[in-house]
Image: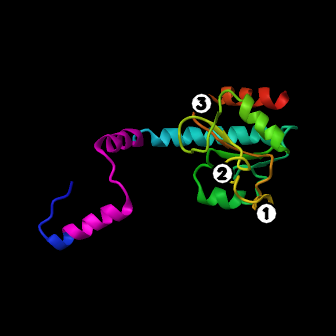
């Protein structure tokens, strides 16, 4: 709620509010304030889990390729190291085929199948079936989105649980 004296300013503020979307409610604001206090801890855990999972998958025989800026094998690792204090909790993995990617989504227990990002839960998605399903296959592949590409958004779960879940599925 904002109170102003001048009608012109009130109209300008109303326009900005109306054109930029809904104003968050009190509960949304309170949740944001509450969550921001532990954000740094959650981001640290996302980064730690991302690096641990990327390193584990990089040498796994069931994985064709791992895309993660924290790995020295990543083409932009040096740039990421200069620009970032952590390397993120997002890991892209190519498991070779769409069938293998689907199997991962069906058999992983710790990871939930979802397109959302930034929560505390670990998520898995298959871009060829989800976020980029409407993009023609030749264009997807030109963007590096192969049928076997899997995106992992690492949450803040225990690293051992994440790695054991991945090993159980990839070894099967």
Looking at marks 2 and 3 on the same chain, the residue that comes earlier in the sequence is marked by: 2
Which of the labelled discs sits on residue 142, or is there none? 1
For the C terminus, give its image quadrant: top right
Mainly helix, strand or loop, the magenta region?
helix
Which of the labelled discs sits on residue 157, or is there none? 3
Residue 146 left/right relative to 86: right
Indicate the quadrant where residue 89 lies: top right
Q: Position of residue 147 (x, y in %)?
A: 80, 49
Indicate the quadrant where residue 154 lies: top right
Q: Position of residue 95 (x, y in %)?
A: 82, 43
Q: Please, what secondary structure does the residue beneath circle 1 have?
A: helix
- Mark 2–mark 3 Cα distance, whole angstroms, equals 24 Å
Residue 142 left/right relative to 28: right
In this view of the protein, which residue sits in the foreground, 144 or 167? 144
Write the residue at 72% across / 27% down.
Answer: 165
Residue 14 left/right relative to 96: left
Q: Provide the residue designation for mark 2.
A: 131
């Amino acid at each position: 709620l904002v109170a102003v004296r001048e009608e012109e300013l009130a109209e300008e503020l109303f326009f900005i509010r109306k054109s930029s979307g809904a104003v968050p409610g009190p509960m949304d604001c309170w949740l944001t304030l509450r969550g921001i206090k532990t954000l740094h801890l959650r981001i640290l855990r996302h980064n730690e889990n991302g690096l641990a999972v990327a390193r584990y998958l990089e040498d796994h025989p069931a994985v064709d390729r791992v895309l993660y800026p924290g790995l020295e094998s990543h083409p932009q690792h040096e740039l990421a190291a200069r620009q970032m204090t952590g390397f993120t909790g997002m890991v892209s993995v190519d498991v070779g085929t769409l069938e293998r990617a689907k199997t991962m989504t069906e058999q992983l227990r710790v990871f939930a199948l979802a397109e959302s990002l930034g929560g505390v839960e670990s998520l898995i998605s298959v871009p060829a079936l989800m976020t980029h399903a409407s993009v023609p296959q030749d264009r997807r592949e030109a963007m590096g989105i192969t049928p076997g590409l899997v995106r992992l958004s690492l949450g803040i779960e225990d690293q051992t649980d994440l790695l054991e879940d991945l090993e159980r599925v990839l070894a099967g």
